[in-house]
Amino acid sequence: MNDDQLLRYSRHILLDEIGIEGQTRLLQAHALVIGAGGLGAAALPYLAAAGVGTLTIVDDDTVDLTNLQRQILHTTESVGQPKVASAQAAIARLNPDVRVNAVQRRLDADAIGALLGGVSVVLDCSDNFATRQAANLACVRAGVPLVSGAAIRFDGQISVFDSRAGGPCYACLFPPDEPAPEVACATMGVFSPLVGMVGTVQAAEALKLVAGIGRSLAGRLLMLDGLSMEWTTMRIGRQSSCRVCGDAHGCAEHAQ
């Protein structure tokens, strides 16, 4: 690290759990963030501010006026722009040393997998079941930890799916062959700060995984009731019958 970096990240370096070694890991890390909406708009600034060296942002959408109630990375001037371009510009203002790759398209599991070379961690900040399943499949195949978040109305949830430790994957908890719930902010609404709370926890989990500190949420689902402001933790386990990571299928390449 140069002198400017030592000063910029000094409050991290002062933490015994992070120090010079942990901050160096962050600077050398590459995070793939799928979705630059509510969750991504909350997670991305903290990843950038913390010094994650490379961010790849994937989103096929453009900024709409209705997004601004919660997607705080975007501004009124961003309306009509691709979300990845708006996010890239905001991160450049926040920390110009962070390298940002903007990918404006929706990806399936194979396309996500093609982006995972050299990626340290994936944050699923998407808003649909198909993309979550695709991200999970790609991460299990590549052995890359996945930090998954979701938020709707006043309810949020976060977990880490890390096949490297033999833990459950997203499909163990939400089987891909079960009907996907029809939930969308456009029809059901979402409490503005909720996406920030979930997204920043995703960022915290990703930073911990990269720095190699603390205990991740792997094997646990953290749920938030925003109306009562109560957090609940549910333990989750790997399912031997899982179509993605289960014993009966041998490996993720067999899952269709």
Image: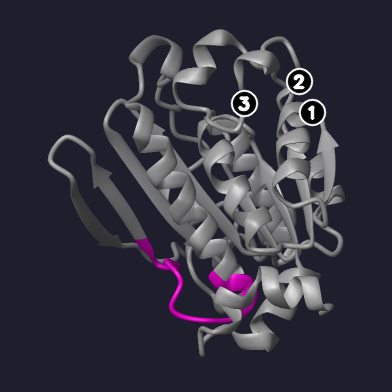
Would residue 178 appear left or right of 156 to someone viewing this image?
right
Disc on the earlier residue, 1 or 3:
3
Residue most extreme to the left: 228
Q: Where is residue 103 in the image (x, y as percent from the top left)?
A: 83, 34
Which SS class for mark 2? loop
Identify residue type, mark 3: His
Q: Name the residue under label 3.
A: 74
Which SS class for mark 3? loop
Q: Is residue 37 above or below residue 116?
A: above
Disc on the earlier residue, 3 or 2:
3
Could you tell me which residue is drawn at 66 percent across and 40 percent down?
34
The residue nearer to you, when weighing 225 against 174, is 225
Residue 26 falls within the magenta-colored stretch = no
Query: Pointer 1: residues within 10 angstroms few (<14), some, or many (20+)?
Result: many
Based on the displayed image, in which of its 4 quarters is residue 130 positioned? top right
Tag 1 and tag 3, C-beta contact below 8 Å: no
Identify residue type, mark 1: Ala
Residue 171 visible to the viewer: no
Could you tell me which residue is drawn at 50 percent across and 54 percent down?
202
Image: magenta residue range = 208-220
Q: Position of residue 221 (x, y in %)?
A: 35, 57
Based on the displayed image, in which of its 4 quarters is residue 92 positioned? top right
Would residue 170 appear left or right of 93 to someone viewing this image?
left
Q: Is residue 4 above or below residue 199?
A: below
Instruction: Tell me the number on the disc at residue 82.
Output: 2
How far apart are the two marked residues, 2 and 1, measured between alpha carbons? 5 Å
How far apart are the two marked residues, 3 and 2, measured between alpha carbons? 10 Å
Residue 14 visible to the viewer: yes
Q: Mark 1 points at which residue?
A: 85
Q: Where is residue 168 in the image (x, y as percent from the top left)?
A: 48, 64
Picture colour scheme: one colour
